[in-house]
Image (spheres, coloured by chain):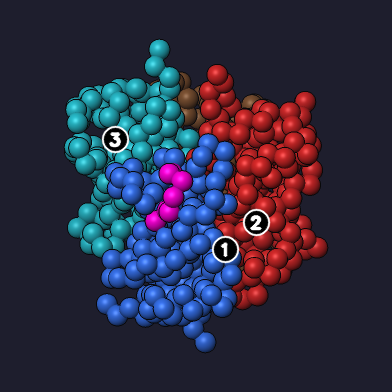
Chain colours: A blue, B red, C brown, D cyan
Amino acid sequence: MELKISVEQYEAIVSERLPFATLMGLKLERISEQGVIMRACYQDAFLRPGGTIAGPIMMGLADAAMYALILSRIGPVELAVTTNLSINFLNKPLPGDVIGDARMLKLGKRLAVGEITLYSDGGSREKPVAHATATYSIPPAT
Amino acid sequence: MELKISVEQYEAIVSERLPFATLMGLKLERISEQGVIMRACYQDAFLRPGGTIAGPIMMGLADAAMYALILSRIGPVELAVTTNLSINFLNKPLPGDVIGDARMLKLGKRLAVGEITLYSDGGSREKPVAHATATYSIPPAT
Amino acid sequence: MELKISVEQYEAIVSERLPFATLMGLKLERISEQGVIMRACYQDAFLRPGGTIAGPIMMGLADAAMYALILSRIGPVELAVTTNLSINFLNKPLPGDVIGDARMLKLGKRLAVGEITLYSDGGSREKPVAHATATYSIPPAT
Amino acid sequence: MELKISVEQYEAIVSERLPFATLMGLKLERISEQGVIMRACYQDAFLRPGGTIAGPIMMGLADAAMYALILSRIGPVELAVTTNLSINFLNKPLPGDVIGDARMLKLGKRLAVGEITLYSDGGSREKPVAHATATYSIPPAT
């Protein structure tokens, strides 16, 4: 499998075109044939009552990891957009980095579906903090 | 129906305890017997490729509107947490404020479920930009 | 708005082509500009522990109501298929008919999204038994 | 890990208490520490337009596989009920048996969350026909 975008290319798109991802401290760590690893670098602004990480950080991480995964498979099609995202929050995250591991479930011509498992950095792989599935719509090639 | 929290009380909780909501420009507009209206006040940082609003802003808005709705029904139980959120993105939002309208579907002792419809400010009510459902877990009273 | 299929036309498709809907006792009651009303006619086979209706009956009802809704808007495009369905079970259904009320959230060229609220026949409109959202993929016109 | 219910015990509950699962041709194949394998044994009544399997069969299979998984972890707590199920349909199933592979994502005291991957019997493991996540509410022990 050929990877159609590098970590550097993805980060260049984000730094120019997706400022909110930068505000969320998102950092793409790895693109491979297995999937994509993305990190939300901890900021105190992520905290919510209970000493844990606010849900929108995890939703944003899941969505961005899936976006990077799709671009790595189809190339820099920036106009790919989320049509559906469903997330289950499973275990209370530690107040630290959160890591998202995105895998493709189906890559079609019109729709791509993936699952994203989220962990606390340093936490057990057996106790993910959240699990999401996301569907993206891929615009017709022009 | 007695409303158990005011707009001011909610905003006080958020400004002290949920800094990320402030970064997202979220502003609670109204709590009523029908539900809750919350606004994501536009910032250029919300943009994504396509000249539209990034998905995580809308997910954060939906989640926060549901949180405010629950607190308005059960009082300031800050430890209520999202267990599931599912969102469908429907129409491309304008580059402006997004408004979330949250209604309760079920308020149980352990779980609360609501739906949140999102509109572009100034856009048609017939063309929502997104629709979400969210489930919160309510901690046992102590 | 022109309705593109009648109750009779829908029932003809189902009786020939969707035998499982018949096994589930599904009956289309009404197609209108507002949406579609479908009924799952009670059978003892629907029961599950707790003296209530098994979840798959409600999932099947939601899915079929959405299918009828789409066909009523685009005509008898039988190959429209569900891509995503998310359902929240809210209140315990009575052991009787269940009624599904489907409304369109977005009708696009490639995707249609709707919401379906389910009630026990004779139960309160304030206490739906379930709420679902469903996305269908619409095949390209040939 | 101790398995709290056997295949035979599960099938006894279903044959007495969940007649609809029998109508759907569901057969529990294996309970293990990894998870649960359940099969929907093909009937012509499963077909839908396109020569493929109707969605409700797959939703029922996913829901039942998750129910068996939970009972295998907590014992025969028949009143465990689905609170949320979200399914993505990925690839067109063959007209034959469908197999569901359920794994636990989180087993809490009040909620259990799992994921269920569905395959066509004889089809590629690389091309699942559907993927679901389901949350069950576990009643308080009495």
Point 79% across, 47% down: residue: B29
Q: Secondary structure at mark 3?
A: helix
**The one of A123 and A5 positioned closer to us in this rendering:** A123
Residues at marks 3 and 2 touching, judged by CB atoms closer than 8 Å: no
Same subunit, labels 1 and 3: the answer reads no
Residue projecting furthest to the front = A44
Q: Give the x, y percent position of residue C75.
A: 59, 64
Q: Is residue D92 left or right of residue A51?
A: left
Instruction: Place residue B75 in its image quadrant.
Output: top right
Query: Which amino acid is tagged 2?
Result: Leu
Q: Is residue C84 above or below residue B3?
A: below
Q: Is residue C76 visible?
A: no
Residue D69: assigned label? 3
Residue at 23% x, 62% y: name it. D124
Q: Quadrant of the N terminus of chain C?
A: bottom right
D4 or B49: nearer the eye? B49
Q: Which residue is mark 2?
A: B23
Query: Numbered disc 2: what chain?
Result: B
Residue at left offset 43%, top offset 44%: A94
Q: Residue at x 53, y 27 (%)?
A: B139
> What is the magenta range?
A93-99
| Mark 1 surroundings: few (<14), some (14-19) or many (≥20) residues within 10 A | some
Give the class, few, some or many, for how many residues have Cα within 10 Å of label 2's Cα (few <14, many ≥20).
Answer: some
Image location of residue C48, percent across then percent down:
41, 26
Q: Secondary structure at mark 1?
A: helix
Q: Kindly identify which numbered label has been placed on residue A23.
A: 1
Q: Work out how far the residue at label 2 is from the one at label 1, CA to CA, in angstroms.
A: 9 Å
In percent of width and height, residue D140 lies at 43, 19
Same-chain check, marks 3 and 2: no
Q: Is residue C20 placed above or below A22 in the rendered structure?
A: above
Residue D47 location (% of width, % of height) = 36, 53
Q: Foreground residue, D46 or B85?
A: B85
